[in-house]
Amino acid sequence: MLLTTAATATNQKPFHEQRLLHGLIAWYLAIWIFLAIEPLDRHDWFLENILAIGLVMVLLVTYRKYPFSDLSYVLFTVFMTLHAIGAHYTYSKVPFGFWIQEWWGLERNHFDRIAHFSFGLLLAYPLREIFLRHVKIHGFWAYYLPISGILALSGFFEIIESWVVLLVRPELGEAYLGTQGDEWDAQKDMTVALIGAFLAIVLTYVLSTRSSRYSHQASG
């Protein structure tokens, strides 16, 4: 099955014929249910999933009117899978992060940095789709605004997370925010998200340029 990958492409088939989307939903549900069983900290798991469930609901509700390309739904699923893993263990205690810490002799578990980097790397392309198809931007702005948007969203979620933990369970601040004693944690998280978004858009530009070149050569 070929993926619809063009940022201006839409899923024309009705949902019941979208086998890829069925598979992605089944994968995420299976992973989410499995990781919902005995998480390391149930209260932190609950807080982590508030925004995650919100994103899933938005994607489901807007599917008919504002569908994304297949590639974007794959990217969403990969990111949500990483988030489900982080929610199960709490981001500061994910085993993979400890392995990296040991291999590289780092001072802390960096799985949360991986997740924030992935936020930019995986979600910049879907955000670009929104700008291209619904805001109708082109040229330089089609590449700049997704990067700027990821940085804005990263900062916005840092603010939302701080208010969620303050209003719901202030004693879970360290576990939920994953600062691990770093007073600059939020700024570093935003930085790696920005780097991820920049790399994603550069890759998108390179591939788009090559695709256009091949199309012109073929038509010529």
Image: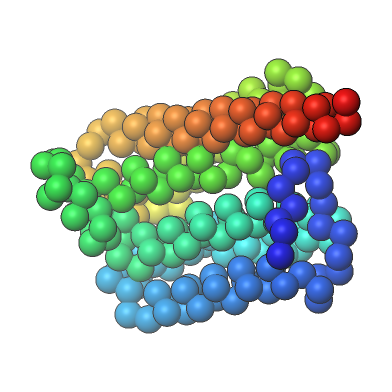
Please tell me which residue lies in front, 76 or 58: 76
Percent position of residue 120, x then y: 51, 39
Between 140 and 149, the one nearer to me in the picture: 140
* Residue 190 seen anywhere in this rendered image of the structure: no
In x, y percent, where is residue 83? 44, 58
**Residue 162 sits in quarter:** top left
Residue occupying the point 75% across, 53% down: 4
Q: Of 96 and 148, which appears nearest the observer?
A: 96
Vertical placement of residue 217 versus 196, above or below = above
Residue furthest to the top = 140
Residue depicted at x 82% and y 27%: 216
At a point 34% along the width and 43% down the height, the residue shown is 113
> Residue 16: x and y, percent?
81, 76
Residue at 72% in and 72% down = 19
Q: Quadrant of the C terminus?
A: top right
* The N terminus lies in quadrant: bottom right
User: In the picture provided, is 17 more to the left or to the right than 117?
Assistant: right
Examine the rendered structure and indicate whether residue 212 appears above or below residue 79. above
Q: Is residue 95 above or below residue 147?
A: below
Say if residue 16 shows up in the picture: yes
Which quadrant of the structure image shows residue 3?
A: bottom right
